[in-house]
Image (tube, rainbow, N blue to C red):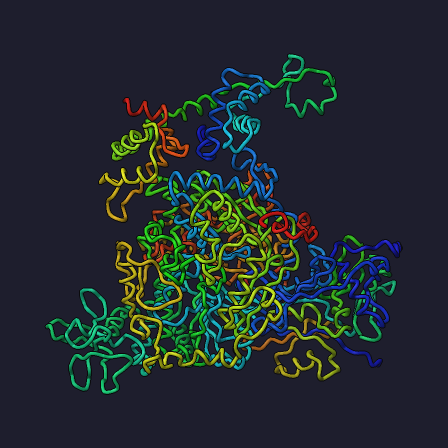
Amino acid sequence: MPSMARNCIVVNLDRCIGCWSCEVACKLENDVALGERWNKVVQVEPFGEFPHVSTYWLPTMCQQCEESPCTHVCPTGASYRDEQTGMVLVNKEKCIGCKYCMMACPYGVRSWNEEQQVVEKCTLCNHLTAAGEKPACVKNCCGTARYYGDLDDPNSDASKALAAADADAVHKLPDVGNHPLTSYILSSRFGEWRVDDLTQQTSKYVTTEGSVD
Amino acid sequence: MTTDLIKHNPLLKKPVMTVLALAEDVTDRAALETAAAAAWDPSFSQTPGAIIDVLVRGGYMAACSFVNGEPYEGTLEDMQLDESVPDDAVAEVRLSLTDEGRALRTAYEPERTVAELLESRPQYDEVFRSVVSSCDTEAGATLPALEALIATFPVTGGTEKTKVYPQYFIDALETAGAITWDGAWRTTAAGRSLLAS
Amino acid sequence: METVAQTSISRRGFVKLGMFASAVAAMAGTATSNLIEVEPALADESGETQKIRTICRACLNNCGIIAHVRDGRVVKLEGDPDDPMNKGAACAKGLAGIQALYNPNRIKYPMKRVGERGSNQWERISWEQAINEIADVMWEYYQKEGPKCLVTSTGGGGNPQFFSPARFLSVWGGGNFFEPGCAQCYLPRNHMEFCLNGTADTSLADGPVTEVYLPDCQTKTYVMWGVGPSTHGIGSTGRVVTELRNNGMKTVVIDPRLTPDAARADVWLAIRPGTDVALMLAWMRYIIDNDLWNKEFVTKWSNLPFLVNEETRLTYRADELGLGSHDEYVIYDNKTKSVKAMPYPFDESLDPAMFGSYELPNGKTARTAFQIMKEHVDEWTLEKAAEVCWLDAGEIEEAIKIYVEGCPNAGISLGVATDQARNSAQAAQGDAVLDILMGCIRVPGAIVQDRPCYVEPCNYVVQPFGLHHPDHPLKMPEAEANARLGYTEHKGLGHWLASHIPTVLKAIETGEPYRPRIWIERSGNKLAMIGNASRFYDAMMTTDLNVHMYMHWTTTSVCLADYVLPTAEWLETNYAQDRLNTYAIRRACTQLYEAVDECMHWSWLAAALAERGHQRAIDSFNPDIAGKFYGTYWKTYEEYMDYVGYFVGSFYYGTEDWDWATFDAQAPSEYETIEQYANKSYDSHLEPDENGLPVGFHTTSKRTEPYFDGNILLGLTGAVDGSGSMDPATDVFPASDNYNPLPYYLEPFESPVEGDPGYDANYPYVLTQGRLPVFHHGTLRNTPWTRELWPYPEAWINPETAREIGIEDGDWLWLESKRGKTQGRARVTKSVAPKVIYQERFWNPELLDSDDPNRAWQAMNINLLTQNNDECPFNDVYGTYTLRGVCINVTKADGAPEGVWTEPKDFTPWLPEPSENTGGGNAVYGA
């Protein structure tokens, strides 16, 4: 087992207020095109019986899977894991635009850059983190809901956020063997984690059983 | 709808009426522009050409293009781009007042608008006439003089909630065309007609 | 397989340049990355990136922002971690600032319309020509009619200097000023809550609520009544409320809509729009009946024990009953069983009865104010409120209990929602009464604190002459102030020197009592923001001259304006902003085209009028007349900036020596410590005055006045006796109604309740609005990154109602009221109750270039449906018309309105067009 770092973002959904600041911060930092969303915030449509409904906002971006399907399927090595940082990244110079990685990603968090005809996605703002700054989405988050860092470093913001959370409040997106690193914190006080039966409804909302019926 | 142009563009009223007055007799566009320019007041905020365009756009005047005396389907711009039109062809645009244009001109004839104002507000008949009359001197009337005059009429005083200010009367008479300002308030011809009636 | 060319990939846009140059340095030493190396030639030419600490104005949160400027271009924005309120957060609105700044639709130069209104043909003119032509018309009209011919307006969006129009009018010498917010946004709370609590209003969005930002904030419960910080403010207010909530602060949210704050609240009361006062009265009854009110505070520091004259409804003065002096009030003393004078602050030998009716020396009887209040709210049981408000009585009780448990380290913030219907004044009264009853004032954790904004509202620097000095020579003459349209009926408007919009429109329509003929407007989109927009359009098409001052083309410019003057984006302006105990600075990062801070527009007009001989305008440039406090008008931007520096120095730092350079050199900085800032409020009413007595509250009686008999005086005279940061005009003529000392409930005029007189089966649903985190009022519909997130207005409909109508999620709809019809797109959701429809204001910039530019404000604009006409009564004190709580019908439409943009790529034409720092309009005019 290589002693790579396990860098990722932890998102605290107790705090996420669905403001889209992280989406726009990411676009500003990385000049992401209209229609492309490297960090897509969707709302889980309120479910339950009105007015005692439950809802939360779910920012989704590259989950930095430990067994990343995208790197496995890439024919050219454009989708790769950086040896030093452990990050799953895209080397656009090698990308041939076959989009296998986009199909393989269970979360649909990779984007197609029309202009350059390559795949791109969240880079964990490694150009900022290498200079000691936080990723743009983390810095600007208005709920102070995002934490970046190496899960193997107990002093990283990400590790500390996870340590402070109740174990049963820590969730991940469905794992189909890819082992996403990204965790979501949602306490029962604030909402019920429903992820297994989410259906994409529109670009902003996802539904689950019990909502919109 | 016919009179909306002036209702929606109060400061275009005078230039529009100037062009409409000339348009019955002058049909060549270039000549109309020249005639209008000669009658133009420096306070008019648009050029004669712009006003003609306004009237054509609104359907108050119709513009017909002619090439070498023959009717041409299209505008001057179309003509210039049209390769079938020889470079040395004589191009003309002739204008004519439409029925809407005549209706507009009639609707805003000052004697008519003054009469309409008086009819619409019979309770102010005496006030209006008094104001118009006091402007009918060589020196005209000052604003303070008119304010003082209007205040003498009980119908304008009322309670604080029903009070009607002198500005209402001055504004209404000016808009209707009974008085005009040139450093003092003066009675117009239409105003004098009112006094005579 | 294809290989992609190695070298020809270039990333779109100027932003890349700045990033790459710094990115290369950052990445030095990293083995691989997905970034492409900058070509050396570009790297060599590029200069340094400057980081400028400045203040956002995408909305009212005024967050600290760091702008990155490279080669004269703003290339990046991020939150300022050192700002004490946003602490590094920055929202979508602020981050879209670069797109707003370099928006291709900027108004770049003064423009004059060619042809008729609405023909959308323009010629570029110089500032010189623009100012002089406008001034020529203004001067002619001033001479021939006097100052009443002018009406000015502003708005909350687009980086306003709120009092610019009012300042100009005070120089002009008369006329009217309106703002679509004002009586429909913040004025009712800003005025009325202060009148009752003698301390401050409870607006979170507009700034007065500062307690939540304190380190170690003690607030145990925060009731957010029609307040959605996650939607209105985000960087500062959204951030801090989220922080406190996650650290254990309890919250109650009262909102028809499931906002993020409602979703995270301990109790969410999904209240029927327009019924808030009913709920407040039920809260009052519960607190009184269950004896939960704060005995010490209410007995000693409110006017509730005072006896009230049953005929006049004013509290008795001791001299009226021969019991003492005029500045003493009257109570019934339980100990001596007699009516006694109550001196200030409190006679400890007395035990005032809080309730009851008592016989007076003159044989009449009088109740205590508290008894009157108790009887007044008696009908408002929890059950009755539940029925009226469409709530559950048990949950109402739960909410009250959570609030009460936190008191007095608690409080209720009231938001803009209740300012938008005809119960506006009463809701502000109700909110203030509740916190007074619970003693949640000037104690740690309370929302109501004594940390004054020195200039109401929102601490704007530039002020109208005479705002604090009634004898100032340039204060608007009293006769003209009293002639302001609608002021007679709605005296509360005087607090902001404003006029009543429906009365202004009626004056334009009928000519009476006098007709405004020149309209100068400094904001974005009246046609999207004013209630019953069609009426507004019809009226403003008939004024003689319309001047629009704004940053980019909107419906006002295209459909109504004769002249269009460019104003500056927040990234182009210099200003000052208080941030708790610090003063921060907005530093212009660039200045584009010939745009200029709106302050200069008014100033230049004043200068042009001065040249023509307008005496007050001449005086406004004379420092001996204008005075240092208000400053003269400014010929150059530098003069304005120096005034700002002076103002901050003199008001906050105790020095008269500052200019802009001094301010700039040390800003942001503390003007007092955070401890001083926090502590100066706690029990500040107990601080001794020069006579050794407590200074008390800023009211007539120096106690809080939950029984606000000053309301009667306000209606009669226009004055509220007692100190405050703004004093309305005095000695005006009577109102038609006596404003009520207590809050009372008015069922919305258009009602969704069958059987109510206001019910119309043709319009069975009730419409409300609410803020979004990507827009601020009418702004940001034309910035691609915000617009692609909310490309059309969503109509939120409960599934039950959707089924009833036959609508599915995503359907395009018609929404219709008695005033008109418009469209929206259905979101079927449990975020609203059955029969309640939510849709936010909207306009479509893309339709401005079409054959019918009016469609831009008609296609998807709920303000075609809202009310602003004579058929519905206005609020008594402020004249508020109805924006939330009108009744509508909803039907399915065939599809989207023609020509509207809904897909992200549609907004490509609006992507930023960067341009050079030209020095703005200041560089070409005004020196």
The answer to whether residue C210 is seen in the rendering is yes
When the figure is inspected, residue B56 is found, relative to residue C165, above or below; the finding is above
Q: Percent from the top left, x then y, of residue C606?
A: 49, 48
Q: Residue furthest top?
A: B69
Q: Where, by quadrant of the figure, is residue C26 drawn?
A: bottom right
When the figure is inspected, residue A175 is found, relative to residue C909, above or below; the finding is below
- For the N terminus of chain C, the quadrant is bottom right
A59 relative to C173 in the view: left or right: right
When the figure is inspected, residue A108 is found, relative to residue C527, above or below; the finding is below
When the figure is inspected, residue C811 is found, relative to residue A79, above or below; the finding is above
C647 or C708, which is in the foreground? C647
C15 or A161, which is in the foreground? C15
Q: Residue furthest left?
A: C363
Residue at the image point whose x is 34% and y is 31% from the top: B140
Q: Percent from the top left, x then y, of residue C710?
A: 29, 66
Q: How many marks?
A: 0
Residue at the image point whose x is 34% and y is 47% from the top: C870
C392 or C541, which is in the foreground? C541
Q: Percent from the top left, x then y, of residue A39?
A: 68, 64
Residue at the image point whose x is 27% and y is 37% from the top: B149
Q: Where, by quadrant of the figure, is residue C416 drawn?
A: bottom left
Q: Residue furthest front?
A: C624
The answer to whether residue C824 is seen in the rendering is no
B156 or C764, which is in the foreground? B156
Q: Percent from the top left, x then y, of residue C414?
A: 43, 67
